[in-house]
Amino acid sequence: MPATAEFAIRARGLTRKFGDLVAVKDLDLDVPRAGIYGFLGPNGSGKSTTIRMLCGLLTPTRGNATVLGVDVSGNTEALKPRIGYMTQKFSLYGDLTVRENLEFIADIYSVRRAERSARIAELLRDYDLERQVNQLAGTMSGGQRQRLALACAVLHRPELLLLDEPTSAVDPRSRRDFWAKLFELSDAGATILVSTHYMDEAERCHRLAILDRGVKVADGAPSELQQSTGMTVVEVLSESPTRAHALLVELREVSSVTQLGIRLRVLVPCTIAEPQDLISRALAAQGLPAETRVVGASLEDVFVAVTEARQAPGAAA
Amino acid sequence: MNALIRLLAVMRKELRQLRRDRITFAMIVGIPIGQILLFGYAINTDVRYLAAAVADQADSHLSRQFIAELRQTQVLNLDDSVATPEQLERMLRSGAISVGLYIPPDFDRRVIDARRPDAHLLVDGADPTILGVANQLATMPIAFDTWRTATPPERALEVRPYYNPERRTAVYVVPGLIGVILTLTMMLFTAVAIVRERERGNLELLINTPVSTAQLMVGKVVPYIGIGLLQLALIIAVGDLLFDVPIRGSVFELYVAAFAFIAANLALGLFISTIAATQFQAMQVTFFILLPSILLSGFVFPFAGMPTFAQFLGELLPITHFIRLTRGIMLREASLSELSSELLLLVLFAAVAMAAAIRRFSRRLD
């Protein structure tokens, strides 16, 4: 089928409830092959639940999803050798060494004995774990564990990698190195689905879905999303940002105000003409001189815009 | 005041957590009520209806009357009847009976001869309780309804204890102890096995790999069978060196029996592991099974002394069958072929528990 060959993941109306709680609601998803697809959303937005449904760990309450041509509501055993899954919590064996963990995973995925030691040596080198090879995984740092987890997830060269907040417990340097690895894997042809709540990581994805309380509120390439917010972003530099913040929030025309150090980022719907003037005048009227300039929307602005839109009364989500 | 508030806060938190831990909550009620009912009824050293058989070679009016009198005491269940004392010995060895009553052909003459015992009780002397009961039976005056017994003999019955004539406790206890030790260690090993992986998060990764449930389950059981057999070797060695406990039957057959028993316990542990949500719950359930394993298996109290219901529960426990096997092989020189039904039950138990564990194990998180 050309439709599934083109997409690694397709979902329609995917829904999961836990009792009364709707964790994921009517999710439609098209994840193209070979590329990094991001799930951006705060905790509790349904990222983990979605990933767990996609790898067959959770049964959807409603809707359907096809992953690598396999329906996840049915028997997903055929899917398992083809995907690599990295859980949010470290799930390798803390009381085994790095090498023992890798050997275990290699055998589980039936990597041939002849190939096994070469593959493990390659991963140890690529993931900078050579010095930790005989260390117990439980005693390693967050960054080292994360590298081991990724090495184990890619060991059997899966077509699809599902990574559930892989960088939530590591420092910025480790995060950068980690993303460099993801790009290498993606260049080699793997499809990667990664969830995150970091804006900078979301910006690196080829495509992206923004989730908010179980609902997909936007999706597309990061640049597309930034251009299609329907908001003008005005940066305000004021001597008294806290007071300016309080004032601007009160304005009917302003959708949201975010303080970044001494600067404020103010989102105003595009339908409002001359937003810069509007803001300058409002602040001047209260004796608050301020510099204003229109800037491009960042992904955070997009995120704020789409999630605020759902909270606004009467807004169509 | 603050101290009291904090104290109360800790207490309230504990109770709230406890209320949400269903299995623990059930155990709080279940352990005392269940076990006290069970053992209050089951623990009974007043042994009745011991499995017995009679070889009545006299077959006279007097001997039949004698058997009827013994039957009235309700101590022996004298329904089976065989032709020779050799057959009684064979039944004793296979564990089919605990007591055999042998009435010699010249019984009628012996009754009037006070120097010779009238009949013999062949007793499985390995069990001190049964031996005690037999001795009591022997001192019981039996009035023969005949003019010749103006002076009834002091002892109508002579007790012949088999298998443990020195009456050493270790000889009797060690074969059962093997069962108790293996039950505790083996069941605990696997009861926490799956739960531990779930608690540590390993399971979420594992069920997303191509490893099948059967591979996972069997892979978790097999290494421990080796450990269990090693434990058996240790107990046998200590039993032999320090307590001089004999193995009269085949050592190989003892290991075969232990293999089946260990597998049954590991499979049962694995099944517990698929029910329990935490390692603590798994341990509670293990102890819930361990107590009856000690008390209802015939290890401490003779099986024959327990009411039918307790006996039924005992029959459901693998250890009951294993103790019959170890006592048979080690003390009575019985062979596995004589005890094949016990072995078969252990194998069946292991297979059913394993199948149940595999069936219950979910490869999904919901």
Image (cartoon, helix red, strand yellow):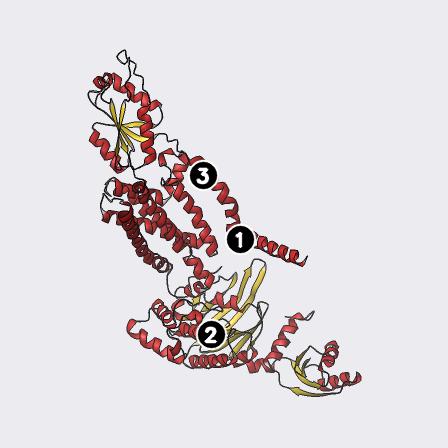
Q: Left or right: A226 with respect to A275?
A: left
| Residues packed near mark 2 inside 10 Å, few (<14), some (14 to 19) or many (20 plus) | few
Hey, which quadrant is residue A214 in on the image? bottom right
Q: Are marks 3 and 2 on the same chain?
A: no
Q: Does the image show residue A221?
A: no
Q: What residue would you read off at disc 1?
A: B21
Spatial distance from mark 3 to mark 2, Cα to Cα? 52 Å
Residue A244, compared with residue B28, is above or below; it is below
Which quadrant would the C terminus of chain A be assigned to in this image? bottom right
Which of labels 1 and 2 is toward the front? 2
| Residues packed near mark 1 inside 10 Å, few (<14), some (14 to 19) or many (20 plus) | some
Q: Secondary structure at mark 2?
A: loop
Spatial distance from mark 1 to mark 2, Cα to Cα? 33 Å
| Residue at figure coordinates x 38%, y 42% from the top left | B316
Question: Residue B54: percent from the left, percent from the top?
Answer: 26, 27
Q: Secondary structure at mark 3?
A: helix
Q: What residue would you read off at disc 3?
A: B38
Q: The residue marked by circle 2 belongs to what chain?
A: A
Question: Residue A150: percent from the left, percent from the top?
Answer: 43, 74
Q: Identity of the amino acid at label 1? A: Asp
Residue B73, compared with residue B175, is above or below; it is above
Q: Identity of the amino acid at label 3? A: Leu
Q: Nearer the viewer, residue B131 or B88?
A: B131
Q: Residue furthest top?
A: B147
Q: Does the image show residue B317?
A: yes
Q: Identity of the amino acid at label 2? A: Ser
Whichever of labels 1 and 3 marks the residue nearer the N terminus, that label is: 1
Q: What residue would you read off at disc 2?
A: A141
Q: Nearer the viewer, residue B99 or A90?
A: B99
